[in-house]
């Protein structure tokens, strides 16, 4: 036989709650009821935060902003599977992840106001600053994973990136290194179908992003990214595996960016209203509410209360953000390196004098 | 050739419009000119610089690429070697770093390593510099890196008019050109831009304003600030236009007249292009200098986010102080 | 069903002539007899060229040199599937490819003597200079492929790279772009099991390199890289497909680097003699000769004649290479850019005056 | 502290040995120091600089990586943020270009963008410069690129003795350091290197030879050529050691005494570090200069292959001519 088969692979997709709010019993029973409340409350909070960010931007009180609308399940379902002591490496569109991890919203707003202090992660959390050069954060997860291994700790690393980022060389080098060194990294691809105006189909001719993991010697899985339970379940499994020394996992969260790319973008230039509407009907809260209602976990009153609390928290955060002193110009020099150079000292004098 | 000599077929345009028109003109003229980059096609570029070009020339000549800067420049190298004239867009200069190996190790060396058998006539266009209050790494001024690398030209327009003439020359140049577009100027100023084609020579600066006491060298967006700050000085202002190779003769002849030179740029001072100009002038015009060459440039700090942008970027006051300093000698 | 299978792949391996010199009749009949003589003669020539390069290096008449011993089938079997008008993008270890394409050996020697003129490809061939930064040539194939498409020509591009190179981001961006634009590129991975001291198993945790192609939406295949007929067959199929508009193919030639990495290396530091001996027994000429003998295409007299001719050609090439005038120092400035800058003119004067 | 003051526990070593010993010493001292790179483990590095370290410290601390420069530096950034002190090896400086985005956009900015919350104490070691007649791109001198980027230090030793003291300081530094090892010097010279640990401060140059007529600034392999060429001149020779931040005070005090300065380096002249030193001195010592600052450096050409290496690299004759030129003023 001149041609032999030397390898076989299968790509799988996970969905726990379908669009009608129905769930697979075997999987659902694994999760405690309280987690659904947590999902609902965090998504609601993140959505309000997001809404307000968009309006602040329109009012000129915030700079360019990247909306997370539609991606809340992918961001929050995954983030909630990590402990606060785990390491989170976000892309630039991860407000929902940060909120789920307990990152202060006032700092998030401050960041989008164009202030570096907004990315000075509070002690107790290990969240790297948002990463602007798309995809360049992927290899950082390798280093953090090596650090964890080196110190013999039981921690995992989450690294978030988009479908666009998956085309960068950094994706390849990051996943390959994580595979070789069997590192505790969870690669969380937020496949929201668009990289600004470039659709997923033009980003790669490969059928899925999940399948690429096999090339690096570990598992990849696609999850319904608008199904918060599926995202959570897949991520939790990957986190547990990572902490048990089982190495990395690639999770492709199949979701959709419902808003413009950022507030500087106009998505109607490159995609159809029909497509957006179809995805709107699949947005994560709809099915979560249906499911929770069936389970007796949701009521209108409960929702109102959640919204009220979230709204208060968002208001407070905005107030605090806007009340912060303006950044000190000298900080840009002071924080460049630990010990200032003579030139920097002269410059500081000039700046302050 | 000045705008006025061009005659009647001109109309006011901003830099976005001028560059767009030049791209169309060059694509009309030479079917081997192709455009590639992120969002340059359907979306017309995030600054709308390539607006309408895909519709007009088709997706085969205006290619929306995956998000892959290294790949965009690497593919451009291959196309250029093949005989095309690719014009690649890097969405912001801060993202060119991922493609530097392709520029330094390949684009700039292909002619040399093949002793002329293969050449790299490619243009990399990218918005650069401070001023639009965009997120981090959207406001880089890394021109000096490219000036240091032999085999590459670096060009920066300062007006819609010279953007057109310089870009056309860059596209027709037989070596790689980094074409840096000051994002702050994209829509801020208009000039009369002739409809017909014209070429402004690479390697030549222009006297933006004549003067006797002091020479000022600047480029891009900083030119306008430097000029504004020169109010009250009898300053000769040179718009460098091509940073590499820069117009040694023009600078020297002005400096020999004025005996004083200030170079203004946005990039951090240390090892910026101002250092080279200062070193060159200090040597070549040693006997003529009445004062040391002064540089007024960015602090030794990474370009900050929006809130501190204006503190980083030399303002009118800082620039004026540099003028005063050299005048005091 | 919460978990669904959304994709399946199979990785295949091709061998035409086995180590005993036996061939699969169905495949073998597709190739004309004369091709085996061509294989034998070209491999013999390349091997002699290589031997002499190594001794010249030892004598100090040549700089650092990268031997191709053991990889001749992978290099020559693939190269012979291309036309002279096709484009060849080599790595730094592709002497065999260049010889098969008809690149003058005198220039090859000259290159290894440290002279740029050695990589000034003669008109009529389209072979890019050897590429020293490992893997950085991969995306050039994308551009050349775009050029071919743009001009509407029926040409293919070969891009050669090693197992080490396959870990670089360039691999990913190159293959992904070729897939998206469906370009006529044949990606020829020379998996010789080592990247200096790093074995294939430490280069990636993925099982094969071939399988990665699926992630980019096109076919990948592993071939027995010491079986010149298999390499030729797989490459020819890929070339035909490319020219017919079928897009790219990834071919992993599974072979072995029998010599040190380069003449500056000492491979005994990191790999066992046993491993090398085992692979020596599988080197490409053994099985080719057995097979050709059975077919009546090989005899001792024929081999002697081939060696004599090859040896004369190599002698002549070395003579010509060594007779070339020394490179003109001014050329390093002259060929930097088309029009010299004022500084360069001053420097030329200084250099020449 | 000089070699002699160090007392008796010293032995002659070459630079490879000195660096190897320093790496071992720092790994012994701090278990968070780890090494990674291509062929650094089993093979001990292509120059044998890391020889024996994997055996001694295990593959968890001396990691052979896949062939992935971007990944090596990106992983180092992650480790450094996590609290380790990675020492990454890039096999030759010509291959660092693939990792520049990680250096410029991340290593150098992490402290600033997180306002001190995350820092990047990493060292990138790489052999650099001309002189071993290796293939293309094995002889790059791209130090100026890194000097231009705020937040990074650049260090170049010139002897086994200072290699040890500088590397130890680099590893203990809390910011990213690019540590450039002149490959030509790896085995060419020996000095007495103490067994015990010692630190040479970053940011400080050293007077290699005192003199009155002329100041010469050089570093790495070029220092030795510049010194050889100084025979017959009463020259003060400064070994810069740290290129960024360079020792402004030492240069200035010497130049104020001699009134003449020549900077010698291998990299191409245009926008090289020589430009910055010339610009700085021309400004800061304006009244003191008897002659213009002269740079003697590489031509405006990409570093050629072996046959022309010696023509590219400033030779004794060219350097001497520069000394003569400034002395003629
Ligand atoms: C390296 C780099 N190239 C280009 C950009 C400009 N840009 C910002 S976001 C974006 C698209 C990112 O797409 P994806 O990774 O899918 O993330 P998403 O925006 O969908 O969240 C682009 C091109 C950038 N920030 N970094
Ligand atoms: C970008 C880059 N990194 C490192 C090197 C040094 N180097 C030369 S060849 C080589 C190994 C290449 O391995 P592989 O791609 O498998 O090719 P092979 O040597 O086996 O032909 C290395 C590390 C280089 N030339 N380029
Ligand atoms: Mg996306
Ligand atoms: Mg190999």
Image (tube, coloured by chain):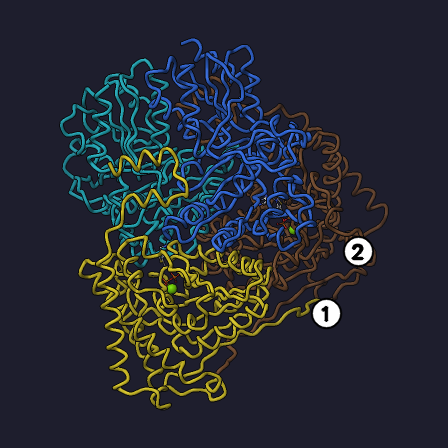
Chain colours: A brown, B blue, C yellow, D cyan
Marks 1 and 2, how far apart in space?
A: 23 Å
Q: Camera-side residue: C146 or B89?
A: C146
Is there a contact, CB below 8 Å, between mark 1 and mark 2? Answer: no
For mark 1, name the chain: C
Q: Is residue A181 left or right of residue A101?
A: left
Residue C314 position within the rendered picture, expressed as x and y whole percent measured from the top left: 25, 69
Residue under numbered circle 1:
C1
Q: Is residue B163 left or right of residue C288?
A: right
Residue D95 position within the rendered picture, expressed as x and y whole percent measured from the top left: 39, 49
Q: Camera-side residue: B247 or A61?
A: B247
Outermost right residue: A300
Residue under numbered circle 2:
A278
**What residue appears at the point 45 percent right and 12 percent down from the top-left corner?**
B325
Which quadrant of the figure shows ligand 4? Answer: bottom left
For mark 2, name the chain: A
- Where disc 2 sits, the SS reads helix
């Amino acid at each position: 036989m001149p041609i032999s088969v030397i390898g076989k692979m299968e790509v799988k997709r996970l969905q726990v709650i379908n669009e009608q709010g129905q769930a697979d019993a075997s999987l659902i029973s694994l999760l405690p009821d309280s987690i659904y409340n947590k999902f609902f409350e965090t998504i609601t909070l993140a959505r309000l935060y997001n809404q307000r960010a968009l309006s602040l931007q329109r009012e000129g009180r915030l700079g360019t902003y990247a909306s997370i609308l539609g991606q809340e399940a992918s961001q929050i379902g995954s983030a909630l599977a990590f402990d606060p002591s785990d390491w989170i490496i976000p892309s630039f569109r991860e407000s929902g992840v940060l909120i789920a991890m307990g990152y202060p919203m006032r700092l998030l707003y401050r960041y989008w106001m164009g202030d570096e202090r907004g990315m000075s992660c509070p002690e107790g959390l290990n969240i790297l600053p948002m990463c602007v050069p798309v995809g360049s954060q992927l290899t950082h997860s390798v280093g953090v994973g090596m650090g964890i291994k080196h110190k013999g700790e039981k921690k995992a690393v989450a690294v978030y990136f988009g479908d666009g980022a998956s085309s960068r060389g950094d994706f390849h080098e990051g996943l390959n290194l994580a595979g070789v060194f069997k590192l505790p990294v969870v690669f969380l691809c937020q496949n929201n179908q668009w990289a600004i105006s470039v659709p997923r189909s033009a980003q790669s001719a490969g059928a899925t992003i999940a399948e690429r993991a096999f090339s690096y010697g570990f598992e990849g899985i696609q999850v319904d990214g608008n199904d918060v339970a599926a995202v959570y379940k897949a991520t939790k499994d990957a986190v547990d595996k990572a902490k048990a020394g089982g190495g990395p996992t690639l999770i492709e969260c199949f979701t959709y960016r419902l808003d413009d790319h950022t507030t500087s973008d106009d998505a109607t230039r490159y995609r159809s209203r029909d497509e957006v509407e179809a995805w709107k009907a699949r947005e994560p809260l709809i099915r979560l509410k249906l499911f929770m209602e069936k389970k007796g976990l949701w009521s209108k009153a409960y929702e109102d209360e959640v919204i009220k609390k979230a709204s208060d928290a968002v208001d407070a955060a905005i107030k605090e953000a806007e009340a912060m002193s303006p950044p000190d110009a000298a900080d840009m020099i002071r924080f460049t390196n630990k010990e200032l150079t003579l030139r920097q000292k002269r410059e500081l004098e000039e700046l302050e004098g | 050739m000045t705008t006025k000599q061009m005659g009647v077929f001109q109309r006011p345009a901003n830099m976005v419009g001028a560059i767009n028109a030049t791209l169309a003109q060059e694509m009309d003229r030479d079917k081997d000119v192709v455009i590639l980059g992120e969002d340059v096609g359907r979306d017309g570029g995030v600054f709308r610089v390539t607006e309408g070009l895909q519709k007009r020339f088709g997706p085969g000549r205006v290619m929306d690429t995956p998000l892959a800067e290294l790949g965009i420049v690497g593919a451009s190298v291959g196309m250029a070697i093949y005989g095309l004239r690719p014009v690649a867009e890097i969405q912001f200069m801060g993202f060119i770093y991922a493609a530097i190996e392709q520029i330094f190790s390949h684009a700039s060396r292909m002619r040399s390593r093949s002793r002329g058998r293969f050449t790299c006539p490619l243009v990399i266009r990218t918005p650069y510099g401070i001023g639009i209050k965009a997120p981090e790494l959207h406001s880089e001024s890394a021109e000096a890196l490219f000036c240091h690398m032999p085999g590459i030209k670096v060009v920066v327009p300062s007006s819609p008019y010279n953007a057109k003439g310089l870009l056309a020359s860059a596209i027709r140049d037989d070596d790689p050109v980094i074409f840096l577009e000051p994002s702050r100027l994209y829509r801020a100023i208009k000039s009369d831009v002739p409809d017909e084609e014209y070429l402004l020579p690479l390697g030549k600066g222009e006297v933006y304003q004549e003067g006797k006491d002091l020479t000022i060298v600047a480029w891009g967006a900083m030119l306008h600030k430097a000029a504004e700050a020169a109010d009250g000085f009898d300053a000769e202002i040179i718009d460098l236009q091509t940073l590499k190779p820069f117009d040694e003769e023009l600078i020297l002849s002005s400096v020999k007249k004025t005996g004083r030179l200030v170079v203004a740029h946005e990039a951090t001072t240390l090892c910026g292009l101002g250092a080279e100009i200062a070193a060159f002038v200090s040597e070549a015009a040693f006997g003529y200098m009445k004062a040391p060459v002064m540089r007024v440039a960015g602090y030794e700090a990474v370009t900050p986010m929006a809130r501190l942008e204006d503190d980083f970027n030399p303002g009118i006051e800082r620039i004026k102080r540099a003028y005063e300093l050299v005048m005091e000698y």
